[in-house]
Image (cartoon, helix red, strand yellow):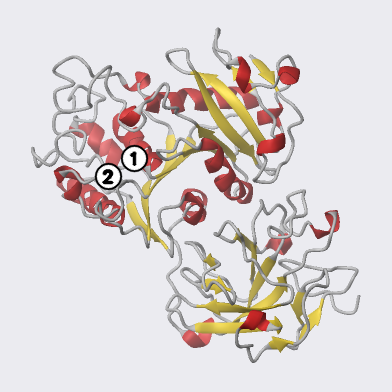
Amino acid sequence: MSIVNSSGGRRRPGWRAGVCAVALTLLAGCELPAGDVAPAERNVTDPAALERPGFGQVSFAAEKGHPLQAWTYRSTGFDPNSGPIWFLMHGQSRNADRYARSGAWVAERHDALLVAIRFSDDWYPGSRYTTGLTRSGKADSEAAAEGRWLPPEATPYGEVERIFDAVRDAIGGQQQGYYLAGHSAGGQFTHRLLTFYPENRVLRAVAINAGWYTLPSASDGDLHQLPYGLAGAPVDEGSAGNEAVRRRLLSRGLAVLVGEKDIQNPREDSRVRGTRQAMAQGESRFERGRFYVETAREEAKRLGVDSPWSFHIAPGAGHRILETVDSAGYLLFAGQPAPCTPETDHDAARKVVIAELLADPPKGTGGDANGDGERDPADDEFVELHNTGSRPVCLEGWSLGDADDPERHVFPLGDALEPGERRVIFGGGIPTGSFGGSQVGRARGSKGFNLSNDGDVLTLRDAGGRVVQQVSWGDCDGAKCADDHWKSALDVAASLSRRADGSWALSPRSAPFTPGEPMREGE
């Protein structure tokens, strides 16, 4: 095994300019093309891409010998012996690097090692990425009879199994399985890996915003023909057409996650498949995800299987990985038994207060509020909420917005905010640290909160759109100021914090911000 690496170490999400370029050769004869590794790095042997926290880029040998590149992120708390290994599958744009950036902060919060494999068009053109089940031609009901059907280990799904072994061996781990999630085309890949690789070692999986599905049924010979269903699939032991294999599939831990706003039909979005079989599953990705789980439940009932499959809606999300990855991370790593139920008691909701906000992170390393190793004027902004009441409050579907955008952040699936607990939402980056043991997230938008130092209005709304609290400062960015108003601008390199008596004060110079903790008064 040879590994080449440059500086390695922690990088913020926009790491392209200085990222380490690493080639990890795990089968003889597999090398990256020379253009993929900088000349000065080509002969430096160092397993840093997987051995220390931060981003890395690695290449593995595929079953046929060609290179498969992957972008990785190892969290600071990852335990190489038993920590979760998480594969995040890209969409049809094949942008695994972007997926690694989008999912890195979730991996950090759950102490995981993230691996985003790129299935390039060169080796997996068109649908060969998501339905690469045959040696040639389409993955249809004639493939098995014509001898074109591949064994599971020769499919793209088999590559994930091989790379899992390679990663585990490289870090000296003892993990018995891995976690799997994919968005859009990656959502198709995810549910088909479970379907067509029965001996997989997936511990839990989330299929996000898939365009259409291979239904786990063959009861309708027309609408359930491959690849839309299992009619025509091989029925040998271990193949998806076998009832015993379907029982195994329906017994696995699969969650289907769809964006609340991913509701476009083929006329509105050309990327939504409009074939007759796909339309029978629903007009939109949202409807098709629900239909897939309902079909699975019907099949499970027919086969006498107690299926744990679940259907979930990502609040406020459309067809973007960044809007769904936080909910997916919860379902993968923490969502047992289920996410909390959105709060309906407005009196309990109003006990959740905006307790601290940072609009102007201090210059230099002292402004690295999110702890990811770099000060960034947008990423290090944050808003902290505090449940001052005596009841848990579920924030699912709640939103934080400013004078320009009412939904700078929409709260994802998750646990309720317990009495006395705090939740901190950073503008971006990779929040790293304990933050007083509070729950932590990051704003969904690429611009973060974009709080104006001169003045703005920060509004917290519940899932029904009702205003829970408003805070404003300075000139209010031209909008109507809130009753809870700080008269001065916040270009002071310190956070605005709520005292124990409910009044506001600027954080002291000795502790200019305290995300997840009460204000340090008197310093």
Residue visible at 60% across and 45% down?
Answer: 104
- Residue 240: where, in percent of width, then height? 23, 30
Q: Going by the picture, which residue comes out furthest to the top?
A: 29
Q: Going by the picture, which residue comes out furthest to the bottom?
A: 483
Quadrant housing the N terminus: top right
- Residue 53: where, in percent of width, then height? 70, 38
Q: Is residue 423 above or below residue 431?
A: below
Quadrant housing the C terminus: bottom right
Q: Spatial distance from mark 1 to mark 2, Cα to Cα? A: 7 Å
Check disc 2 and report the residue beneath it.
212
Check disc 1 and report the residue beneath it.
188
- Sequence order check, earlier mark of 1 and 2: 1
**Given contact means CB atoms under 8 Å apart, are the residues at marks 1 and 2 in contact?**
yes
Rendering quarter of residue 200: top left
Residue 240 appears in the rendering:
yes
Residue visible at 49% across and 36% down?
Answer: 178
Q: Going by the picture, which residue comes out furthest to the left?
A: 221
Relative side of 71 to 500, left or right: left
